[in-house]
Amino acid sequence: MVKPEGPTRAEGACACGAVRIEIGVPARWAWHDHSAGSRLAQGCAYATYVGSYRSRFRYLQGEEFVTRYEDPDTGTARSFCARCGTPLAYERRHSKVMVNIPRALFASGVGREPLYHIGIAEEPAWAYRQERLKPLKGYPGVVWTGPRRKPRVADIA
């Protein structure tokens, strides 16, 4: 059997570049996590992760800048760059052979597209819902949904 040609590794880095990581590709899986835990840890409406076998994940540089938060109630651990705060890894006690990495750390492909959504019931009301967007006049590169439509009297009655 002939193996397909292409990259076998994907490199990622934190925002300040102090920590560099590497995973084997293709990643095991990829998903969007809408759960409150990930939303708070990442500071966004949802976080996109790629999963890698721990044996295919390694720090290339800056491991001394990695700090961890372990939550004894949930059995999870989150790693961050101590210099810039970038989330680096998410681990679960019940899945010791896997490590989950924010997809945004990788500039290149990881061999998996995020096809799954976890915790969708926890998605906040303020998250983007595929509304129609239009350019905001006077602000290049900014789009918006436009003003909220006021209900007509007929709509209220």
Image (tube, grey):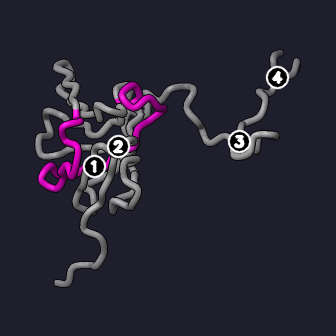
Residue at mark 4 to residue at mark 1: CA–CA distance: 50 Å
68 relative to 154, above or below = below
Q: Which is more N-terminal, label 1 or label 3?
A: 1
The tag on residue 49 is none
The residue under label 4 is: 150
Crowding around mark 4 (Cα neighbors within 10 Å: few <14, some 14 to 19, many 20+) is few
At mark 3, the secondary structure is strand
The tag on residue 143 is 3
Residue at mark 2 to residue at mark 3: CA–CA distance: 27 Å
At mark 1, the secondary structure is strand
Specify the amino acid type for callout 3: Val
The residue that appears at 36% across and 36% down in the rendered structure is 86
**Do callouts 2 and 3 mark residues in contact (Cβ within 8 Å)?**
no
Q: Which is more N-terminal, label 4 or label 3?
A: 3
Position of the C terminus, as image quadrant, is top right
Crowding around mark 2 (Cα neighbors within 10 Å: few <14, some 14 to 19, many 20+) is many
Residue at mark 3 to residue at mark 4: CA–CA distance: 21 Å
Crowding around mark 1 (Cα neighbors within 10 Å: few <14, some 14 to 19, many 20+) is many
The residue that appears at 28% across and 79% down in the rendered structure is 5
At mark 2, the secondary structure is loop
The answer to if 52 sits in the magenta stretch is yes
Residue at mark 4 to residue at mark 2: CA–CA distance: 43 Å
Q: Nearer the viewer, mark 4 or mark 2?
A: 2
Crowding around mark 3 (Cα neighbors within 10 Å: few <14, some 14 to 19, many 20+) is few
Q: What range is drawn magenta here?
A: 38-66
Q: Which is more N-terminal, label 3 or label 2?
A: 2
| Place of residue 101 in the rendered image (x, y in percent of width and height, measured from the top left) | 29, 44
Specify the amino acid type for callout 4: Lys
The answer to if 45 sits in the magenta stretch is yes
Specify the amino acid type for callout 1: Arg
The residue under label 2 is: 14
Q: Nearer the viewer, mark 4 or mark 1?
A: 1
